[in-house]
Amino acid sequence: MTSINDLADDIMQAMQEYTAEVEEAIPEIVDDTASTLVKEIRSRAPKRTDKYAKGWTSRKLGERTRSKEGYARLVCNPKHYSRAHLLEHGHAKRGGGRTAGKLHIQPACDKVLPGLEKKIEEAVKR
């Protein structure tokens, strides 16, 4: 017959294995989603010279930056960061009037991020 202490140890062991599996799966899921998001933004971005579209990238945030958040990746355009909101939402022209914005970031996020939630839920349910 199994003692209570052995049962508790077995449950603890199973929980640690489960936690390790989930902790291994989440970074892979986040990395894949971030690269998909970068590709989606690049394909939707305005391409007058193509430098802006090619500038989109993904990088891992440091431990000190988001230690409470866990594993995180930043999708950004480090070379042309100041243009992103102007191209997304439009801006005032020099002689008056406004330019029309070209939505490319928000639609890409709306398309890709729900899949991230589903993949993480599947990893936790396994």
Image (spheres, rainbow, N blue to C red):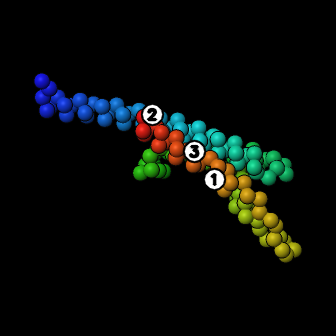
The answer to which image quadrant residue 7 occupies is top left
Q: Residues within 10 Å of mark 3 (few under 14, many from 20)?
A: few
Which mark lies nearer to you, 2 or 1? 1
Q: Residues within 10 Å of mark 2 (few under 14, many from 20)?
A: few
Q: Callout 2, which amino acid?
A: Glu
> Residue 24 shows which numbered tag?
2
The residue sitting at 48% across, 50% down in the picture is 65
- Is residue 57 at all visible to an observer of this figure? no
Q: Which residue carries the number 3 mark?
A: 115
Query: Is residue 74 placed above or below 28 in the rendered structure?
Result: below
The residue sitting at 34% across, 31% down in the picture is 17
Closest to the observer: 126 or 70? 126
The residue sitting at 59% across, 38% down in the picture is 32
Residue at the bottom extreme of this rendering: 96
Alpha carbons under labels 2 and 1: distance apart: 26 Å
> Residue 110 shows which numbered tag?
1
The residue sitting at 32% across, 34% down in the picture is 16
User: Which one is earlier in the sequence, the residue at label 2 or at label 3?
Assistant: 2
Q: Are marks 2 and 3 in contact (CB under 8 Å)?
A: no
Residue 34 lies, in percent from the top left, at: 60, 43
Q: Residues within 10 Å of mark 1 (few under 14, many from 20)?
A: few
Which mark lies nearer to you, 2 or 3? 3
Q: Callout 1, which amino acid?
A: Asp
Quadrant of the snapshot with the N terminus: top left
Residue 97 lies, in percent from the top left, at: 83, 74
Q: Callout 3, which amino acid?
A: Gly
Closest to the observer: 59 or 120? 120
The answer to which image quadrant residue 21 occupies is top left
Q: Secondary structure at mark 2?
A: helix
